[in-house]
Image (tube, rainbow, N blue to C red):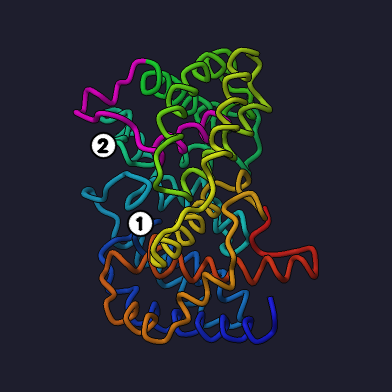
Amino acid sequence: MDLSLNKIIRERLQRIANVLLLNASFLDNPGLLNGKMGISIFFYHYSRYSNNKIYEDYAGELLDEIYEEINTSTPVNFENGLTGMGWGIEYLVKHGFVQADTDEALEEIDSAIYRHRINSPVLINTGDDLFGYGFYHIARILGHEIDDNDLNTLIKKYHLIFLADECERLLEQKSYSRFNIEELTINSFNSILWFLLEIQKLNIFPVKTEKIFRSVPEYIEKEIHKPYDIAGRALLLRLVEKSIETVKDNSVRDLLNSMVEKIESEKTHKELPDETDVSDFIKDTWQRLVYGPYITNTAGMVFHFDEIFAIIDNEHSWNKRLENLKKEDIGLTGLTGLALGLLMAQSAEQRAQSKTGDFQD
């Protein structure tokens, strides 16, 4: 990335930060992908990047607002609710932005999620939801000492075993049909596949997990020929490649290998409107945040960055983007995601020079 482009990106990031400073506190959504938690994560990263503590302080203020706004009507889903908010706290502690004992900080959220799960074990309401229970409970066990003689560890493993059963019901028995959902979208499926890979790494319920993987090729086959959601397909490819490395059943592995070849042959970025390119860039950004370490460095989408930035650097387009902002356009699936993507690009450039960076796990 040349110095002039680097400078322009810094200016754009500053402008986005100013917009978020003015608008974030007015959001009534405390969640990760569409609300304050995602914006808080951006500001913690931006504070390190800019070496300006003002942004760190503001990120902390947003966290305080999030905790104050939690109530009995707060949803549990990953995009807007408790599982995403709890995941965000674990992320911030893991990356050294916040100092806390998350077993204490998340005690009330743990209890609320458990109570909700008793009544709604799937947390797939539209067929397009991310598997929030899976993301949350994996985050709650990773980064903590895993001691099978410790009650806290055993409770966390119990949650994962329960969720493995739910994955079986989702993929093999198609339990989502009970909720008038015709099929799982690539978003839901990717998140479930990610969860299966994580519990497999933890050696939790290995026989069950291996059995569930037999259902995976059927769902991949449905997604291969769909022309949209290029960022989702790029993630699917990476997850399938990781599955091939871990699945023991030769017949399943052969099927997955054939799926990779089909996805590879279909993954060329077709002629699409400029705004679609930006949307793909934003989605790839929040996927990199949420799905690490499966998407790191060049393992996500491959962008011609100069072309992407040329689209959003057009002054008329840029002003129009900022003037027409709605509440639902501000979070990680919108303006904040765009800013975080630009920040990741600059951090990647810095890593190439220094071999270190904020976004490495």
Is residue 108 among what the camera can see?
no
Q: Which residue is mark 2?
A: 125
Crowding around mark 1 (Cα neighbors within 10 Å: few <14, some 14 to 19, many 20+) is many
Horizontal relation, residue 201 to residue 340: left or right: right
Estimate the x, y position of residue 290 in percent, counting from the top left.
51, 50
N-terminal of the pair, mark 1 or mark 2, is: 1
Q: Quadrant of residue 247?
A: top right
The residue under the point 61% across, 28% down is 243
Label number found at residue 346: none
The residue under the point 50% across, 55% down is 284
Q: Nearer the viewer, residue 76 or 271?
A: 271
Quadrant containing the N terminus is bottom right
Estimate the x, y position of residue 291 in percent, counting from the top left.
54, 46
Q: Which region is colored magenta?
A: 173-197
Element under label 2?
A: loop
Nearest to the eye among marks 1 and 2: give it.
2
Q: Which kind of residue does numbered mark 1 sit on?
A: Gly
Q: Nearer the viewer, residue 165 or 180?
A: 180
Which residue is farthest right?
354
In three-dimensional space, the C-alpha distance between marks 1 and 2, rounded to whole angstroms, equals 17 Å
The vertical placement of 273 against 214, above or below, is: below
Label number found at residue 31: 1
The residue under the point 50% across, 68% down is 42
Estimate the x, y position of residue 171 in percent, counting from the top left.
40, 22
Estimate the x, y position of residue 13 in percent, counting from the top left.
51, 79
Q: Quadrant of residue 152?
A: top right
Q: Which kind of residue does numbered mark 2 sit on?
A: Asn
Crowding around mark 2 (Cα neighbors within 10 Å: few <14, some 14 to 19, many 20+) is some
Confirm whether the magenta stretch covers residue 41.
Answer: no
The vertical placement of 285 against 199, above or below, is: below
The vertical placement of 63 against 195, above or below, is: below
Element under label 1?
A: loop
